[in-house]
Amino acid sequence: MELNAEGLKNLQWWREKGYQLPDFDREKMEQATKEKPYWIHFGAGNIFRAFQANVVQKLLNCGVLDRGLLAAEGFDYEIMEHMYWPHDNLSILATLKTDGTVEKTVIGSIAEALVLDSANAVQYNRLLDIFRQDSLQMASFTITEKGYGLVNGSGVFFQEVAHDLKNGPNKPQSYMGKITALLYARFLAGKKPIAMVSMDNCSKNGERLLEAVRSFAEEWVENGQTDKDFLSYVTDESKVAFPWTMIDKITPRPDDSIRRMLVKDGIQGLEPVITTKNSYAAPFVNAEVTEYLVIEDNFPNGRPALEAGGLIFTDRETVSKAERMKVCSCLNPLHTALAIFGCLLGYSRLCEEMEDPELRKLVERIGYAEGLPVVVDPGILDPRGFIDTVLNIRIANPFMPDTPQRIVTDTSQKLAIRFGETIKAYLASKTLDLKSLVGIPLVFAGWLRYLMGADDNGKLMDLSPDPFAEEISLRLRAISWESGEKADEVILPILRRAEIFGVDLMEAGLGEMVSVYMKEMCTGIGAVRRTLKKYLGN
């Protein structure tokens, strides 16, 4: 059986195999959505298909919505070429439950899939047309933290960004330049209102999106590339809003065991593809059951009734508290810690790490002892209960094929938020002692030890992609992982880099502690394990 519109006509076959199906007229939905689009999403990856597209499908099934989603991909066009278009924008969601059962759903809520490519006249003109529509209420994003960046690690504009800042909204090359150009088309069509909703897993995500868009608008207005009122338009919340959000759902890389299960059912053409941009794409996605999406309720052109699908709409302060709770204390730091030490200690599955006594002590200390004291309760989610669920149910789920090697990707972009904010809170507190922190300094030391490229048994390992990995790894080569010789000389300057750690660790008073831990992790085979045991207790 093929996963496409023709194959889906055989409803009986799919139902007998246990698949939940779109319970609405897809052709009618597609036509209505294309004529009056209300929601376009940028970033057509796993979490979008597992979360937002699934929520919309549920609401289509029960009649709350009569139109679906538009999807756009602005980074890796091959995702559309290999995964969306050949399958008529259908995908399979495999929801992995803690009891070992798998809920299989054919997701059919995506009406149209496009590439955000200004060199592709047909596709780009269609996007411009969508942004001119009165009906468009929101554009949302899951493009990762890097997607909003305009400068490299040295503070220099990326080449595409510099081109767009200079040349204006005509045929932009950078991601944010293209997004701003689409907004300019909406401005020219009558200054129509819209919500630009970042749903990425990063702090103050709406503010990051606004800052990127404003940078282009300011430059274009100043250089006479756009109407002088364009900047006022994108910074007027009654016209263009940038709501903050908190999103949480684990969607690991599509796992081959899931592919084999689907193939055994008789579905053809499910082979994954590794694109030229190194994206691992498949016509299916596997995900956990748990999901949260908290959104600041600021939609100048109205919004669909997505609360009926479990999304939480509230004010910005509550979103910020929920986001900080998760990103800075109750989930993301625990993930990052497990990812770093999982790679060093030879693990290939995150769930197995929860059976490791040292690693469990590490994340329990970071979450309960070091993180909870500075968490502000958002009121809509209980922080301690959230950590309980993360450690005992979500990460511990043996049927979730998530890997430390995936999660350790781009760690340099995560440390400042996931740990730096806690350090700042300790520094600002009159009652908390910064020197009581043990787990967080161990993570910093572990990350540097990881970047040396050898695990705790001395076996060479491939490093996951990270914008600072090559630079820092090159410096760390001067250190012997067997003796720690020259460690201080190399490490201490790195620990001063607030753009990585969120604070200057030497100035904050944690640098020497990190250096000590790092040197102890560089005393031969088993040193990482010995260091964890020493400082976390036997």
Image (cartoon, helix red, strand yellow):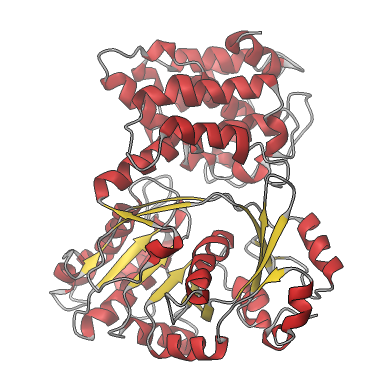
Residue occupying the point 44% across, 70% down = 41
- Residue 319 location (% of width, % of height): 32, 47
- Residue 411 location (% of width, % of height): 53, 40
Depth check: 6 or 100 in front? 100
Residue occupying the point 77% across, 33% down = 460
- Residue 5 location (% of width, % of height): 67, 86
Query: Considering the image in quadrants, where does the C terminus appear?
Result: top right
In the image: residue 452, left or right of residue 432: right
Depth check: 491 or 179 in front? 179
In which quarter of the view is residue 373 placed? top left
Q: Is residue 92 above or below residue 481?
A: below
Question: Does the rendering let one see residue 445?
Answer: no
Depth check: 275 or 378 in front? 378
Residue occupying the point 27% across, 18% down = 429
In which quarter of the view is residue 147 placed? bottom left
Query: Considering the image in quadrants, where does the N terminus appear?
Result: bottom right
Residue occupying the point 47% across, 60% down = 142
- Residue 326 location (% of width, % of height): 43, 39
Q: Is residue 415 above or below residue 360?
A: below
Question: Does the rendering let one see residue 198?
Answer: yes
